[in-house]
Image: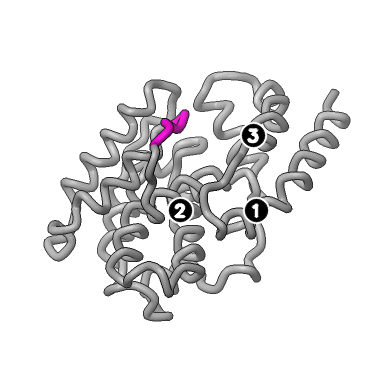
Amino acid sequence: MGNNASSVQGNIPEIILNTENLYEGNLSYYFKVVFENAKNLKNPYHNFRHMMHVTWLCYDACRHYKKVLTKREMRNLLIAAMFHDFDHPGKARNDELNVEKAIKGLKKWIAPEDKPYFDMIAGPIKTTVYPYKRIKHLTLQQQILRDSDLCQVFSPVWLQQVVFGLAAEIGCPAITFLRSQEKFIGKIKFNTEWAKDRFDSAKLIKIKEVRDLLKILE
């Protein structure tokens, strides 16, 4: 699902089934909920792939911070990742409304054993409102989810998923959106050491790719 499959252990079924026993329980119930009920699965960008890509990256971060985060905290984060864009309308509007939809979906579908942790799961989702608001103290889970949510651009399928996908949702030509990517990528500042280690070196490579694509297209 990510930019380098060999750098992250675990495919989606392994993550959902928790074959590494990394976090508490497993996520089979939530995967079924998203797969069968989310209304945004086929959106151009805020779709099933994006939600699973973010979950995949959050899992990688959990492995990185397994001595820092508890198994319960990791479970909360992964549920938040799966639901952070639940029922996204797939069009440009106030992102606070999109996050409200996601929280509503979480509240409707949360499993009984996770209800005591609802606020801890919803908390990271609330911080994904974009453009990001400056928050003085982000928890590690909130930092991880924010960082993961930005990183689709470093995936091999980013032209389809990000350029064509987000351009369609925003309502602009793909070439116009592509032109905006150098500036966007250059301004990315990660919160976590995990994301810095994993993606900072990829920023210059991706910017060069954008420039080279524009040379071809223009």
Closer to us: 77 or 107: 77
Disc 2 to disc 3, C-alpha distance: 18 Å
- Residue beneath the point at 23% across and 47% down: 106
Q: Is mark 1 on a helix, strand or loop?
A: helix
Say how many tags the image has.
3
Mark 2 or mark 3, earlier in chain: 2
Examine the structure image and report whether residue 12 is included in the region drawn in magenta. no
Circle 1 Cα neighbour tier, 10 Å, few/some/many (<14 / 14–19 / ≥20): some
Q: Where is residue 7 in the image (x, y as percent from the top left)?
A: 63, 68
Q: Specify the label residue 144 is tagged with.
A: 2
Q: Where is residue 125 in the image (x, y as percent from the top left)?
A: 33, 44
For badge 3, the amino acid type reads Lys
Q: Is mark 3 on a helix, strand or loop?
A: helix
- Residue beneath the point at 37% across and 80% down: 21
Q: Position of residue 20 (x, y in %)?
A: 42, 80
Closer to us: 177 or 193: 193
Q: In which quarter of the image is the C terminus?
A: top right
Residue occupied by mark 1: 199
Mark 1 or mark 3, earlier in chain: 3
Q: What element carries label 2?
A: helix
Closer to us: 20 or 188: 188
The answer to which quarter of the image holds residue 46 is top left
